[in-house]
């Protein structure tokens, strides 16, 4: 994918190349933004076939048509983008590249679920994914990652819905579909992503202790074999629907998060004058247009537009969430 001439200097630096971050990375590249990914030396990405973190282990990867490659430095990263139009992945856990690249956007996609070292001011636009990060303190915007109608919402004040530690439901299954480490140690896989397994079948081992599938289905995600894990670490997940092709497709959740990231970039970029009028992409609203069509949760004025865009009479409602309590943070 070629970098669009409008965004050739609008660099996006992403910390973390896991599934949700990769959904956003893929859309950013499609939109024409030059994008660089920073990873740790041994990333614990589960859905590796749709994660640019896979390049750390294999040297190269591809996520739904977008190529990725492990590179040594920023100079090589820029050459790769220019020649291939793909996603360069660098091992840089301390984000030293941030100072060298000076990106327009810093996206924290590590899903740490707690504040780490990301702060407002590290780039003109700072965005973070998921719970535990406070919009207005650690980032300019936080993207909701909780499954449900809120998924992908852009939060400009406060936090995303707190992490419950309980996997989202999929056709009645929750924790049953998740593979977890029974103890601390080195994980060794006995299967590959896309393999079909039966309930009770051994999927791998942590040291000498077996990890068994709790339900029958297709292995949708699995950690890279040989990684050191802690007790309770998510090792993989099983999709009971049995469609191996789904293992190579980004999830609806990742797509929703990606849309939220793009919305935040264009909204904040326009408000802060980072896009000139002549470079505004087709279809992107001006600042005044954007503000006129947005209301906060709980705005129950007669005829005020709800988040779905329809008028929401006080006595009827349109089905949109209308209580701030449904969400820890505020949208616009």
Image: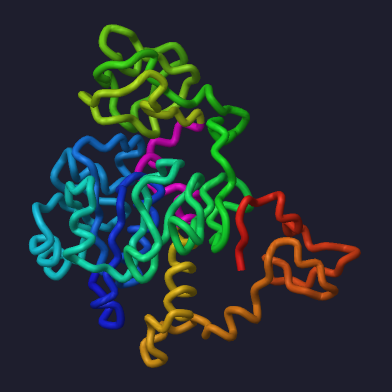
Residue at 54% over, 63% down: 156
Q: Main secondary structure of the magenta part?
A: helix
User: Vertical placement of 51 versus 305: above or below?
Assistant: above
In the rendered view, tell whether residue 168 sits above or below residue 146: above
Name the one closer to the observer, 304 or 298. 298
Q: Is residue 126 magenta?
A: no
x%, y% of residue 86?
A: 21, 61
The residue depicted at 29 percent of the width and 78 percent of the height is 7
Q: In the displayed structure, does residue 221 sit left or right of residue 153?
A: left
**Range covered by the magenta-colored residues:** 241-257
Identify the image quadrant of residue 288. Answer: bottom right
Extreme-right residue of the structure? 315
Where the C terminus falls, by quadrant?
Answer: bottom right
Taking the magenta stretch, the answer to whether it contains residue 248 is yes
Relative to 114, 51 lies left or right: left
In the rendered structure, the answer to whether residue 234 lies left or right of residue 161 reads left
Residue at x 57%, y 55% (from the top left corner): 158
């Amino acid at each position: 994918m070629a970098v669009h001439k409008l965004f050739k200097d609008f660099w996006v630096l992403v910390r973390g190349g896991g599934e949700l971050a990769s959904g956003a990375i893929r859309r950013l590249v499609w939109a024409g933004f030059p994008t660089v990914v920073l990873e740790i030396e041994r990333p614990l990405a589960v859905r590796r076939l749709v994660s640019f973190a896979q390049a750390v282990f294999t040297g190269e990867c591809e996520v739904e048509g977008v190529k990725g490659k492990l590179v040594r430095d920023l100079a090589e990263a820029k050459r790769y983008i220019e020649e291939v139009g793909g996603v360069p992945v660098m091992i840089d856990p301390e984000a030293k590249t941030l100072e060298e690249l000076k990106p327009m956007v810093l996206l924290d996609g590590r899903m740490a679920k707690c504040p780490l070292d990301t702060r407002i001011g590290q780039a003109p636009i700072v965005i973070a994914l998921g719970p535990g990060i406070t919009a207005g303190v650690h980032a300019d915007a936080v993207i909701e990652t909780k499954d449900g109608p809120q998924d992908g919402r852009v939060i400009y004040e406060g936090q995303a819905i707190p992490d419950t530690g309980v996997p989202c439901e999929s056709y009645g299954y929750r924790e049953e579909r998740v593979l977890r480490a029974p103890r601390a140690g080195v994980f060794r896989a006995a299967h590959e992503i896309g393999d079909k397994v039966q309930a009770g079948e051994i999927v791998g081992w942590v040291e000498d202790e077996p990890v068994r599938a709790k339900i029958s289905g297709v292995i949708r995600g699995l950690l890279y074999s040989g990684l050191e894990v802690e007790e309770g670490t998510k090792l993989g997940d099983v999709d009971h629907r049995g469609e191996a092709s789904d293992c190579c497709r980004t999830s609806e959740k990742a797509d929703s998060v990606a849309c939220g990231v793009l919305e935040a970039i264009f909204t904040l970029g326009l408000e802060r004058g980072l896009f000139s009028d002549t470079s505004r992409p087709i279809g992107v609203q001006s600042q005044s247009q954007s503000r006129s069509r947005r209301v906060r949760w709980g705005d129950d004025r007669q005829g005020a537009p709800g988040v779905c865009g329809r008028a929401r009479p006080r006595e009827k409602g349109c089905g949109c969430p209308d209580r701030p309590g449904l969400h820890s943070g505020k949208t616009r």
